[in-house]
Image: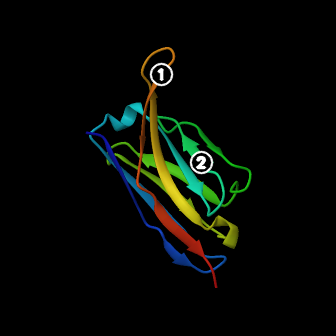
Amino acid sequence: QAQLVESGGGLVQPGGSLRLSCAASGLTFSSYAMTWYRQAPGKERELVASITSAGDSTAYADSVKGRFTISRDNTKNTVYLQMNTLKPEDTAVYYCNAKRPAGLQSSYIYWGQGTQVTVSS
């Protein structure tokens, strides 16, 4: 059974940093593209950053470019999100997502349970 477990969230002051981790089990991690999403209260879930299965390409939301870095370690089945220069508007529950094609029109998709990030003074 595939499982994604996020960790590393917490309360941080504006301008501070946090590093989120997402540990995967029960799936062939190196076959999955990994994505971090976030959802703030009253808002829709939004894509934050993604990384290819091999880790050779990344993409970011405009709101986090230059501040957040996504990376992965396929030997540890873990994806990371380094968040620097945090702002109050980064406050949200952060979710880890794993996805790989399962055919021409379908995919295997898994979600973690989320970790809360609160940026406040």
Give whichever of 81, 45 is nearer the camera. Answer: 45
Residue at (56% x, 43% y) in the render? 50
User: Residue 87, percent across and down?
Assistant: 68, 71
Q: Residue furthest front?
A: 42
| Label 1 SS | loop
Q: Is residue 16 left or right of residue 26?
A: right
Residue at mark 1: 106
Question: Split into 4 quadrants, where in the image is the N terminus?
Answer: top left
Residue that badge 2 annotates: 49
Left or right, residue 83 beside residue 80? right
Q: Earlier in the sequence, mark 1 or mark 2?
A: 2
The outermost residue toward the bottom is: 121
Give the quarter of the image for residue 5.
bottom left
Q: Amino acid at mark 1?
A: Ser
Q: In this rendering, is residue 71 above or below 87? A: above
Colour option used: rainbow
Answer yes or no: is residue 33 visible. yes
Say above or below: 99 vs 10. Answer: above
